[in-house]
Image: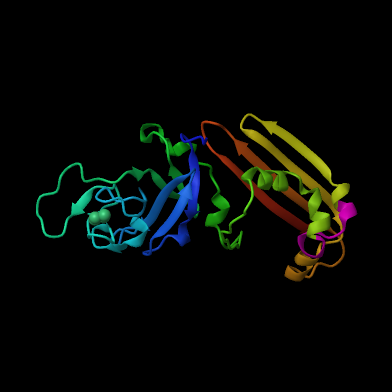
């Protein structure tokens, strides 16, 4: 069972171009695409209302997404705007569409009651919009495991000193002795792990030729509101020591 009246990340914005992207989100088959003219991203149920063909096998054409079976075209709202060989289009010729919002390089989808889709509840992640100050790149990969194991992994960063010893981890002792600042919040939990006056781990040294020790910190926020969404923010920081 899934919480439906909440925002979920459906994809990175860059993943959805003219080609169709099919995803299963909360067990619902969804197809994502961009309108050819406006560039607006949209999400439809991945099932044609005519004969049930998955729309992922269609293509983006002028006016919307064209089903690959008999050529009906659906716009971003799921309304059928073209049926080959006939002028009359029934009002019932419609595919379910989902509220979709592009924000901070994410595409957020709402699978529940569209009337409740309050866009002000979408998490802010402004760092994605500042490549100069926060250069970054991102990818998507599948984890063949319960998603709660990922939550466990990211909430317990003591593993960094062991699994990631040769990259972003470094000396395990530094992690074990990290100074924790924990702030329980109404929406979840925020914490910072300080590793002051420590040797920079291999990945950091590779990126910046630090001279001597650094002050490191890891800042993490877990958001878990049943009426909103589950998400996690994770930021790593490092600064050279003065003097
Ligand atoms: S199944 Fe989609 S147009 Fe016929």
Residue 240 in view (yes/no) = no
Task: Name the residue: 26% across, 52% down.
Answer: 75
Which quadrant of the render holds ligand 1? bottom left
Q: Residue 48 versus residue 40: which sits nearer the camera?
A: 48
Residue 13 is situated, as x and y percent measured from the top left of the image, at 46, 57
Position of 75 with respect to 215 (left or right) is: left
Residue 201 is situated, as x and y percent measured from the top left of the image, at 81, 62
Q: Residue 147 versus residue 188: which sits nearer the camera?
A: 147
Residue 200 is situated, as x and y percent measured from the top left of the image, at 82, 62
Residue 216 is situated, as x and y percent measured from the top left of the image, at 79, 54
Residue 137 in view (yes/no) = yes
In the displayed structure, would residue 173 be above or below residue 228?
A: below
Task: Name the residue: 68% across, 45% down.
Answer: 149
Task: Name the residue: 15% across, 59% down.
Answer: 84
Name the residue furthest top.
186
Per the rendered image, the range of residues in magenta is: 165-174
In the displayed structure, would residue 142 be above or below residue 25?
A: below
Residue 166 inside the magenta-drawn segment: yes
Residue 221 inside the magenta-drawn segment: no
Position of 171 with respect to 26 (left or right) is: right
Task: Name the residue: 24% across, 50% down.
Answer: 50
Quarter where residue 65 is shown: bottom left
Q: Residue 163 versus residue 206: which sits nearer the camera?
A: 163
Chief SS of the magenta region: helix
Name the residue furthest left.
87
């Amino acid at each position: 069972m899934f919480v439906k009246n909440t925002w979920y990340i459906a994809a990175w914005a860059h993943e959805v171009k003219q080609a169709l992207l099919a995803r299963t989100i909360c067990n619902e088959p969804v197809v994502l695409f961009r309108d050819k003219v406006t560039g607006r991203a949209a999400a439809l149920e991945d099932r044609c209302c005519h004969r049930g063909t998955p729309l992922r096998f269609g293509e983006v054409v002028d006016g919307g997404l064209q089903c690959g079976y008999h050529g009906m075209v659906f716009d971003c709202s799921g309304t059928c705007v073209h049926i080959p060989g006939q002028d009359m289009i029934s009002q019932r010729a419609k595919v379910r569409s989902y509220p979709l919002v592009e924000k901070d390089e994410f595409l957020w989808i709402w699978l529940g009651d569209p009337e409740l889709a309050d866009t002000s509840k979408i998490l802010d992640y402004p760092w994605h919009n500042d490549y100069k100050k926060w250069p970054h790149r991102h990818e998507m990969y599948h984890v063949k495991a319960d998603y709660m194991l990922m939550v466990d992994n990211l909430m317990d960063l003591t593993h960094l000193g062991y699994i990631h010893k040769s990259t972003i981890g470094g000396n395990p002792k530094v992690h074990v002795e990290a100074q924790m600042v924990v702030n329980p919040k109404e929406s979840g939990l925020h914490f910072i792990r300080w590793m002051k006056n420590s040797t920079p781990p291999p990945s950091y040294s590779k990126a910046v030729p630090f001279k001597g020790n650094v002050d490191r910190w890891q800042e993490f926020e877990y958001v878990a509101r049943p009426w909103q969404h589950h998400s996690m923010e994770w930021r790593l920081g490092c600064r050279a020591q003065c003097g």
